[in-house]
Image: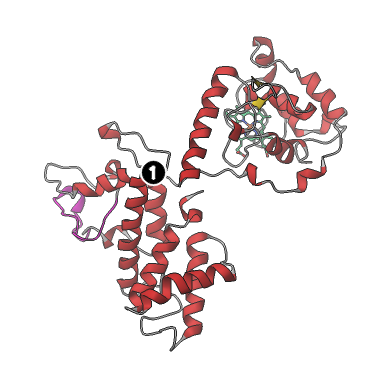
C-alpha cells in the first residue's frame, strides 16, 4: 500500500514539475535527470532522449499514460515509438508515420499529431523548438536499437489503482451479481418510488448514480458513504475522487469483498464463484474439483493463471483453515482474498 501511495505521489509531483518547467524525465524520479552535484537539470541522456524532450511539449499531454504512453520515459519512447517499425523507419524519414503525422499527412484514422494542431504552428509559436526537418535528420541517422531495449525493466512498470466506479462495476460482473441482488427493482415504477436498500447486503453505489431521485426517495445513506470511502467522488457534495489507495479504501474493500463474495456464493444457480464445485465438495471428498475451482477463480479475478506456489498458498493459508468451519466460508475467503490482491486493485 505504502509503495503504491508514494508512487502515486511521485506521479503527482512529476506532473506538477512538468507543467512548470516543460521538462520531462524518468517519471519515478520526479521529472528530472539528477546531476552529480545534486542539482536538477533537463539534460538529455542521448540523442533519442533529446528528441523525446523536444517533442514532449507537443505530445506528452496525451501520451504519458493510457495505451500509448510514449512520453512516460525514455524506455517507453524508444520501445514504443522510436524502434517501432510502424512509426519510425530507420534511415527513411519520408516513409515514417511519425514524420507524416507531424506533417498532417499520415494515412489512417489519425492523419495529424497532435490532433487538430499543425506541428509547424507549434514550432512557429515557440512551444516546441525542434523542427520537422530536424526530426527527419534524426531518423536518417538513427542508430540501431540498444540491446537493453529487449530487457523488461521493473522501473518502467506503470500502474494506477482502480477507481471506485471500476471496482463496483467490475466486481458485480465478476461475481455474477446485479442491481437486483441489492435493491428491489421488481416494481416497474421503482425509479419513481420510495425504495429501501435491502439491509445487510453491503450495497456500495455512487451517489451520482442514485437509481432514482424523487420526493419519496428513501435510500441507505451508507451506500454512497461506502463508495466515497472506496475513493469515489460525489459531484452533488463537491467531493473529488481520491486517486490514492488509503486505509479507508482498503477497509471498505475488505468489507465489500467479503459481503459481496458471500452474496455470490449464496445466490442460487450462480456459477461465478462456484463453477467446478458445490458446497458439498470438500478437500478430502473431491480434492480435484476444489483445486480446479481455486485456479479458475484466480484466473477469473486476476486475469492471469496462478503459479503453483500461489495456488498452493491460497489453498493452504486461506481455503483450508476456513473450510474447517464450512466450505461456504472457504470459498468466500478465497474469493475475497483475490479481490484484495494487488493485481485486482491496480490497472
Ligand atoms: C490532444 C491529445 C494528443 C496529443 C497532444 C498527441 N496525441 Fe498522439 N494520439 C492521440 C490519440 C487520441 C491517438 C489515438 C488513440 C490511441 O491509439 O491511443 C493518438 C495516437 C498516436 C499514435 C499512434 C497512431 C497509430 O495509428 O497507431 C502516435 C504514433 C502518436 N499519437 C504520436 C503523437 C506524437 C508524436 C505527438 C506529438 C507531436 C502526439 N501524438 C500528440 C492523442 C494525442
Q: Residue furthest front?
A: 37
Ligand 1 quarter of the rendering: top right
Q: Is residue 179 above or below residue 72?
A: below
Report x, y in % for residue 79: 73, 41
* Residue located at (49% from left, 64% from top): 300
- The dominant secondary structure in magenta is loop
User: Residue 50's quadrant in the figure?
Assistant: top right
Q: Which residue is mark 1?
A: 246
Q: Which of 120 and 58 lies nearest the eye of the viewer?
A: 58
- How many C-alpha atoms fall within 10 Å of the one at disc 1: few (<14), some, or many (≥20)? some
Question: What's drawn in magenta, residue-wise?
Answer: 185-204
Report x, y in % for residue 303: 54, 60
Report x, y in % for residue 110: 65, 33
Q: Which of 145 and 30 lies nearest the eye of the viewer?
A: 30
Q: Is residue 213 above or below residue 274?
A: above
Q: Which of 123 and 11 lies nearest the eye of the viewer?
A: 11
Magenta highlight on residue 53: no
Q: Residue furthest left?
A: 216
* Rendering colour mode: secondary structure
Q: Is residue 104 visible to us here?
A: no
Report x, y in % for residue 38: 64, 23
Amino acid at each position: 500500500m505504502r509503495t503504491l501511495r508514494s508512487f502515486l505521489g511521485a506521479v503527482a509531483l512529476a506532473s506538477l514539475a512538468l507543467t512548470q518547467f516543460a521538462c520531462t524525465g524518468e517519471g519515478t524520479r520526479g521529472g528530472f535527470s539528477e546531476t552529480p552535484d545534486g542539482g536538477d537539470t533537463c539534460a538529455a541522456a542521448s540523442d533519442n532522449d533529446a528528441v523525446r524532450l523536444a517533442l514532449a511539449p507537443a505530445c506528452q499531454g496525451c501520451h504519458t499514460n493510457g495505451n500509448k504512453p510514449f512520453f512516460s520515459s525514455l524506455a517507453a519512447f524508444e520501445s514504443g515509438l522510436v524502434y517501432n517499425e510502424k512509426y519510425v523507419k530507420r534511415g527513411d524519414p519520408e516513409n515514417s508515420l511519425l514524420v507524416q503525422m507531424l506533417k498532417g499527412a499520415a494515412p489512417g484514422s489519425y492523419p495529424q499529431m497532435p490532433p487538430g494542431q499543425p506541428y509547424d504552428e507549434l514550432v512557429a509559436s515557440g512551444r516546441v523548438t525542434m523542427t520537422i526537418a530536424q526530426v527527419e535528420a534524426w531518423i536518417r541517422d538513427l542508430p540501431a536499437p540498444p540491446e537493453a531495449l529487449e530487457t523488461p525493466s521493473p522501473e518502467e512498470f506503470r500502474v494506477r489503482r482502480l477507481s471506485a466506479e471500476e471496482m463496483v462495476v467490475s466486481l458485480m460482473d465478476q461475481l455474477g451479481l446485479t442491481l437486483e441482488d441489492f435493491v428491489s427493482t421488481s416494481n416497474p415504477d421503482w425509479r419513481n418510488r420510495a425504495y429501501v436498500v435491502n439491509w445487510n447486503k453491503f450495497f456500495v453505489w455512487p451517489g451520482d448514480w442514485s437509481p432514482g431521485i424523487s420526493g419519496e426517495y428513501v435510500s441507505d445513506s451508507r451506500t454512497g458513504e461506502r463508495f466515497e470511502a472506496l475513493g469515489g467522488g460525489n459531484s452533488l457534495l463537491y467531493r473529488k475522487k481520491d486517486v490514492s489507495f488509503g486505509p479507508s479504501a482498503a477497509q471498505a474493500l475488505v468489507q465489500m469483498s467479503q459481503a459481496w463474495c458471500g452474496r455470490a456464493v449464496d445466490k442460487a444457480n450462480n456459477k461465478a464463484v462456484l463453477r467446478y464445485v458445490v458446497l458439498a465438495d470438500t478437500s478430502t471428498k473431491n480434492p480435484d474439483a476444489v483445486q480446479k475451482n481455486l485456479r479458475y477463480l484466480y484466473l477469473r479475478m486476476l486475469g492471469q493463471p496462478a503459479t503453483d506456489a500461489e495456488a498452493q498458498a491460497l489453498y493452504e493459508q486461506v481455503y483450508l483453515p476456513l473450510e474447517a468451519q464450512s466450505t461456504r466460508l472457504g470459498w468466500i475467503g478465497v474469493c475475497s482474498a483475490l479481490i484484495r490482491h494487488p493485481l485486482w486493485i491496480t490497472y
